[in-house]
Amino acid sequence: MESEKNSFYVIKWDFLPDVFRKTLQVKELLSKGEVKTVNEAVQIVGISRSAYYKYKDGIFPFYQMSEGRIVTLSFLLDHKPGVLSRVLNIIAGVGGNILMINQGIPLQGMAYVSVSIETATMDCLVEALMNRIRAQDGVKKVELLAQN
């Protein structure tokens, strides 16, 4: 049974007990910056601080398994000055280490770009980074292509 302590399992959202779902909701509110404190977040979702602290290190979204690894993101960008630069600055701003950039020749005013990023030093989750990039003018599409 000792080896099971560090094992991971995939469980459908519907099967999770309420306290785990609410713990994930608190973590999401905090990572998106929608609240400033744990206290504020637990009040919004309706769990105690002690329940949050008890479970926060043991439950996380599946995509978070990519933290500390290399991810490749794909972007569809408007072919306008500064769009790619803003995307790269966002990645650098959260501590992402850009390993490789591939950019196709822009066609019909759109450019396809893929960027491989080392996530070990990032101060946010990959999904939060993707959401920040999606919110930028000129960014049409953001996808997670691969994770190692």
Image (tube, rainbow, N blue to C red):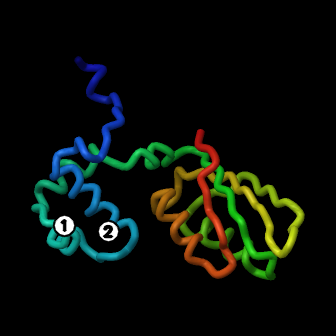
Looking at the picture, does residue 5 appear above or below residue 66? above
Which residue, given by chain and number where applicable, does mark 2 sit on?
29
- Is residue 40 left or right of 100 when viewed as pictured? left
- Is residue 124 left or right of 58 when viewed as pictured? right
Question: Which residue lies at the image location 53% right of the left edge and 64% below the top edge?
Answer: 129
> Which is more toward the observer, 145 or 116?
145
- Is residue 121 left or right of 86 when viewed as pictured? left
> Which is more toward the observer, 55 or 133?
133
Q: CB atoms at circles 2 and 1 under 8 Å apart?
A: yes
Q: Quadrant of the N terminus?
A: top left
Local SS, label 2 = helix
Q: Which amino acid lies under the numbered mark 2 shown in the image of this protein?
A: Leu
The disc, 2 or 1, on the residue closer to the chain's N-terminal end is 2
> Which is more toward the observer, 101 or 120?
101
Residue 110 screen position, x and y as percent: 80, 71
Which residue, given by chain and number where applicable, does mark 1 sit on?
45
Local SS, label 1 = helix
Q: Quadrant of residue 22?
A: bottom left
Residue 92 screen position, x and y as percent: 62, 67
Question: Which residue lies at the image location 13% right of the left edge and 54% below the top edge?
Answer: 51
Looking at the picture, does residue 44 appear above or below residue 47? below
Q: Residues within 10 Å of mark 1 (few under 14, many from 20)?
A: some
Residue 106 screen position, x and y as percent: 86, 68
Q: Which amino acid lies under the numbered mark 1 shown in the image of this protein?
A: Val
Question: Which residue lies at the image location 48% right of the left edge and 59% below the top edge?
Answer: 127
> Which is more toward the observer, 118 or 62?
62
